[in-house]
Amino acid sequence: MANTSSAKKAVRSSARKTTQNRLVKTKVRSAVKNARASVKKKDENSVIAIKTAVKELDKAASKKILHKRTVARLKSRITKQANKAK
């Protein structure tokens, strides 16, 4: 258990950041999942889904929630899958 006031503040701050990061990661996972599903179904809205996924991935990378190379890999895979489907 935290004893000093600064340690207690760090615990509160960490909990707040964990919650925020979890929300962002959930949005990213959902966007990527939707993009993959729409490409797989050859849906007409797949371009919009891919743009949304890329946007969410870039936001997560800029906030350093996800590593930039992880984001690059995911974007590459989604794009490759979309190009293959065409």
Image: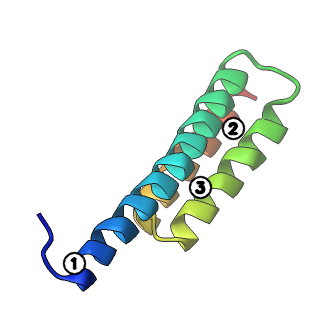
The answer to whether one can see residue 12 in this image is yes
Alpha carbons under labels 1 and 3: distance apart: 32 Å
Q: What's the CA distance linking mark 2 and mark 3? A: 19 Å
Image point (47%, 56%), residue name: 21
Residue at the spot 67% in from the left edge and 33% down from the top edge:
35
Label at residue 83:
2
Residue at 37% x, 59% y: name it.
15
Residue 7, numbered circle? 1
Where's residue 86, x and y in %?
76, 29
Q: Residues within 10 Å of mark 1 (few under 14, many from 20)?
A: few
Residue that numbered label 3 is attached to = 57
The residue carrying pointer 3 sits among few (fewer than 14), some (14 to 19) or many (20 or more) residues within 10 Å by Cα, namely: many
Q: Nearer the viewer, mark 1 or mark 2?
A: 1
Viewer-side label of 2, 3: 3
Asked which quadrant contains residue 49, the reply is top right
Farthest residue to the top: give it: 41
Query: Residue type at mark 1?
Result: Ala
Counting residues from the start of the chain, the first of labels 1 and 2 encountered is 1
